[in-house]
Image (cartoon, rainbow, N blue to C red):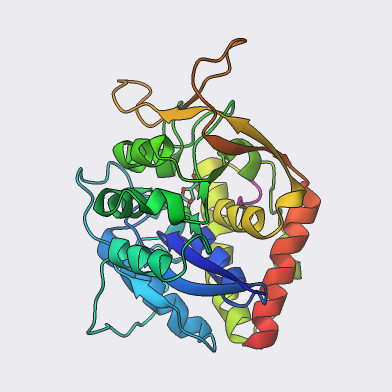
Amino acid sequence: MTRKVIIDCDPGIDDAVALCMALFDPRLEVVAITAVGGNVSPDQATRNVQAILDQLDPPRRPRIGCASEPANSLPVDAKHIFGNDGLGNNDFPFVEHHQRHAAEKVIYDEVHAAPNQVTIVACGPLTNIARALLRDPELAAIIGQLVIMGGTVSAPGNVTPAAEFNIYSDPESARIVFRSAMTKTLVPLDVTTQVAQTYDFLDQIPDETSRAGRFLAKTLPYLYRTHRQHLGEEGIHLHDAVALVAATDRDLFELRQMACDVEVAGELTRGATVFDRRRLPQWRPNTEVAISADSTAVTDCILRGLAEAARAT
Ligand code: BDR
Ligand code: CA
């Protein structure tokens, strides 16, 4: 039986890789892709979701949820890493849909259509998930599972010394989500950065005879270049693809129940994820947190997912 999935994302090349894997994974039925501002503006994120679908042309088109402006304007973007358009400056064409539905409405609809059966993989700021919860607090009890790429436990942040990009981009929304009763799995930077894709990864992705292969060839090399130029790294981290693997192959991760909240006020620490790790914790565990991963097996999973996408396209 396939599992219903919503991918909430801010493409972003690592988001795009996660989409590429999810759309052709025979274990999953991607019922919707919802866009959120983060790496790029909300409008650009929506355009990118449409463009990625047009590039890959999967046999079954999921519903698209459009991103809207967050309550507080986005404090950062990641154009220096992903390009001005978020997808390696390819300016992929896209067809504007006439019927535009807000991301949180699409989440609400799909979760209500299949209570307790929908997994949401959140690859961007948690704006849409928080809005869906504010629209209907009952949703927390009927979302099957929420897998979040974001935060850090012990590792440094990647946008400030304390904060990871997705949480930093909208800490108020993240706090609403962490404080909700939803079943949550967090895949923090500590784990996604354990899984590095060095240059040999590029030799193992599908060749350009398929749509998926052509899309990857146009986007991934850009990410290697910017990682070298801006981060001084000889390889990349496909954070969102790792989070997708945590949703499909959880056995590859060591998971621990922890109590997590988000700092929304700190001058130096806004957007940091805070865990109660005292000897006698006083907060109740509310999140299953990935502590470590079998990084070789996770990379193999990513490569298998991309190979499957190439076979299908
Ligand atoms: C996260 O931030 C974004 O830039 C990436 O797409 C990923 O979701 C990593 O911190
Ligand atoms: Ca992302």
Predominant secondary structure, magenta span:
loop
Q: Where is residue 189 drawn, in percent x and y?
A: 57, 39
Q: Where is residue 272 drawn, in percent x and y?
A: 43, 29
Q: Hey, which quadrant is residue 163 in on the image?
A: top left
Q: How many marks?
A: 0
Q: Residue visible at 41% across and 71% down?
A: 113
Instruction: Report the residue that reaches farthest toward the top.
Output: 279
Q: Where is residue 47 drawn, in percent x and y?
A: 32, 72
Query: Is residue 52 at all visible to an observer of this figure?
Result: yes
Q: Is residue 313 magenta?
A: no
193 relative position to 9: left or right: right
Q: Residue visible at 53% across and 42% down?
A: 231
Query: Is residue 45 at all visible to an observer of this figure?
Result: no
Vertical comparison of 194 with 63: above or below? above
298 relative position to 116: left or right: right
* 82 and 298: which is toward the camera: 298
Vertical comparison of 36 with 106: above or below? above
222 relative position to 246: left or right: left
Vertical comparison of 21 with 196: above or below? below
Q: Hey, which quadrant is residue 37 in on the image?
A: bottom left
Q: Where is residue 271 drawn, in percent x and y?
A: 38, 32
Vertical comparison of 36 with 183: above or below? below
Q: Residue visible at 45% across and 78% down?
A: 62
Residues rendered magenta in the picture: 234-238
* 233 and 74: which is toward the camera: 74
Q: Residue visible at 19% across and 46% down?
A: 71
Q: Is residue 235 magenta?
A: yes
> In which quadrant will I find the N terminus?
bottom right
